[in-house]
Image (cartoon, helix red, strand yellow):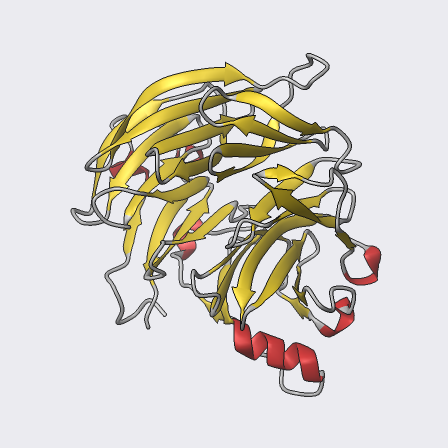
Amino acid sequence: MGGSGPKPWEWTEEAYSTDPDKERSQFGSVVSFYPATDQHSLAIGSNNGSLAFFNLSTGSFNQWHEVTPDRITGLVAAPVSSHLFVSSNYPEIHKWKLQRPASARHEKEALVESPQGTLVRPQAMLFHDPHLVLGTREGAILTLDAGKLAVQQAIPNAHAARIWDLDISPGGNHLMSGGADNSAYLWTLSSGLVDPPSATLKITPPDGNGIVSAVALTTYDGALLFALGTENGYLTLHPKESPKRSREHVLFLGSGIWSIDFSPDGQLIAAGTQSGDTFVLHTDQLLAFCAGGTKPQPTPIPMTISPEYTSAFTRISSIQFSPDGLYLAVGHPRAAFILGVCP
């Protein structure tokens, strides 16, 4: 990983910002690849509410914008319409029109309201054409029309507490949510909406303990495979056919897991932790260990990040493989990174 593959880029606030007086703690946070002339354009949302666009082809930033007075919590791209959706600590969604090369213009913003008319704050967000799906701090799942940013479906009590993460299966037939109520739920989708409006499957972490802080879905060997990360550091893999055998599917990564992503082919899984570490594992090795229980525990491959930017309580809040799987983007509170993934 990283050493002899595509060129890895690393940047800090000196390259990110045009203002040399900005504090170090305000950069990085959330990352998202988006469609451009190639598959290697990246949007970065920061802790101070700014948004930047990075072009890997040139190794430089093309634009930098002040979006909101508070931390950006989510970025998702809509490939077909070339839009980027931005959420923050405020109860609003910003919609940007992506342009080429790596740049964008602000198109519209909208407050996010529940069907009862109260404002809600998105904690998790994903795009599923033509919908934008939100998981809120109040435990609701809202499905919005991505064009009008208007709520089309609301599941007010999807979780009993904050929803930390959402992911959608490669075929678009399933949605997974993970929350602060120590649970993850699998939902069935029909025409982009949850149908029926109740969870198909409930999964709890090992011993039923620990906030489910990160979730990810992939298709592996023709079957649905999902992963959970918990605040107490457990990474669990669950084939859909045997989701409750969690004790046989557990790996401890040392500290809370706050971001997970599978590579596009499902062969790798990356996880970012509370302690600022990023790990990559081979899915087949992890499944082999999980199935047997007696084989040597697989060793996570650490993705090296300079110690200058990592310290206790600086969680990796965002992690994402590029669409072609050649790069891994990492959002860290003090910096953002792109790491080359060797074949």
The answer to which quarter of the image holds residue 164 is top right
The answer to which quarter of the image holds residue 195 is top right
Q: Where is residue 118 in the image (x, y as percent from the top left)?
A: 69, 14
Instruction: Count the numbered circles shown.
Output: 0
Could you tell me which residue is drawn at 54 percent across and 69 percent down?
A: 220
Question: Can you say which quadrant of the picture contains the N terminus?
Answer: bottom left
Q: Is residue 146 left or right of residue 156?
A: left
Q: Can residue 334 be seen in this view?
A: no
Could you tell me which residue is drawn at 55 percent across and 53 percent down?
A: 169
Q: Where is residue 34 in the image (x, y as percent from the top left)?
A: 34, 42
Could you tell me which residue is drawn at 65 percent across and 28 percent down?
A: 153
Question: Can you say which quadrant of the picture contains the C terminus?
Answer: bottom left
Could you tell me which residue is drawn at 27 percent across and 40 percent down?
A: 54
The image shows residue 316, relative to residue 80, as above or below, that is below
Q: Is residue 254 left or right of residue 155?
A: left
Q: Is residue 3 left or right of residue 90?
A: left
The image shows residue 186, relative to residue 79, as above or below, that is below
